Amino acid sequence: MSKTRLRAAQDLLPRCGRIADIGAGDGALALSLARSGEQIRVVATEVSAEPFARLARACAAAPLVEVRLGDGLAPLRGEVFNAIALLGMGARTILEILRNAHEQPNALFVLGPMQHAPTLRAGVGALGLRIVDERLVLERGRLYELIAAHQGEAAPLSWLDQQIGPVLRTTRPPGFSDLCRKRIVPLSARLMGAAPDQREDLLRKIRSIEEACDGPQAV
């Protein structure tokens, strides 16, 4: 994970308590969290033997990081965590893991899909999680959306909020206009050859994104 996305993820995570990094890879996030203060305890997991061995080697000298082998949230079962990070995965993989989110009812879930963030937002709501914060990272011409959610009652997300994020729509961070354009491109492509009723719906969706994109953005 790049330093930019690492900082964005840490910005969404709490500064103390027990934090789990699921599918921790090279341990970059877990190690960075452990270095940030003695009030943090980190559990880093991997799902199979070879990645787990690499993770264990990377974290061997970090006493505040415990490494565990297991799938999804299973290695955390029976324990309470303040926050759980699921980064660098596909949206559908994240949603599959979140089917067991009820096992951690008090945890903040920080999600960093590699792609298909609209699918993730829609699925998060269907699983009873509420989006409470978001970040947008522009890195080497590619956009990454990070989403923080926890258990809680929330109205179903509108199509527009699924596409560009309910928090991002408000904060309008740098790169927000690029995100809007990214969502408009496939809609515009579908206009060619679309039936009249489909064309009207596509134009309505494009206009809604364009209107959301108008206005000053954060610097």
Image (cartoon, rainbow, N blue to C red):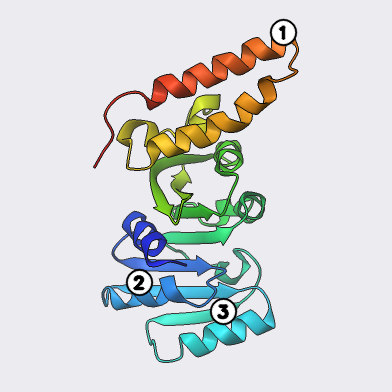
* Residue positioned 45% across, 46% down in the render: 149
Going from the N terminus, do you reach mark 2 or mark 1 first? 2
- Left or right for 219, reference 147: left
- Left or right for 197, reference 125: right
Q: CA distance from mark 1 to mark 3?
A: 55 Å
Helix, strand or loop status at disc 3: strand
User: Label 2 sits on what residue type?
Assistant: Leu
* Residue positioned 72% across, 8% down in the render: 196
**Where residue 185 appears, x then y in whole percent?**
57, 31
User: Label 3 sits on what residue type?
Assistant: Arg
Residue with the mark numbered 3:
68
* Residue positioned 43% across, 66% down in the render: 2
Q: Can you say which quadrant of the picture contains the C terminus?
A: top left
Helix, strand or loop status at disc 2: helix
**Where residue 59 appears, x then y in whole percent?**
45, 85
Q: To which quarter of the image does residue 75 belong?
A: bottom right
Q: Badge 3: how crowded within 10 Å, few (<14), some, or many (20+)?
A: some
Q: Which residue sits furthest front?
A: 192
Q: To which quarter of the image does residue 35 belong?
A: bottom left
Q: Which mark is residue 33?
A: 2
**Where residue 83 appears, x then y in whole percent?**
42, 59
Q: CA distance from mark 3 to mark 2?
A: 17 Å
Of circles 2 and 1, which is in front? 1
Q: Are marks 1 and 3 in contact (CB under 8 Å)?
A: no
Q: CA distance from mark 2 to mark 1?
A: 53 Å
**Where residue 23 appears, x then y in whole percent?**
57, 69
Q: Which mark is residue 196?
A: 1
Q: Badge 2: how crowded within 10 Å, few (<14), some, or many (20+)?
A: many
Question: Which of these two is toward me, 33 or 218?
Answer: 218
Going from the N terminus, do you reach mark 3 or mark 2 first? 2
Helix, strand or loop status at disc 1: helix
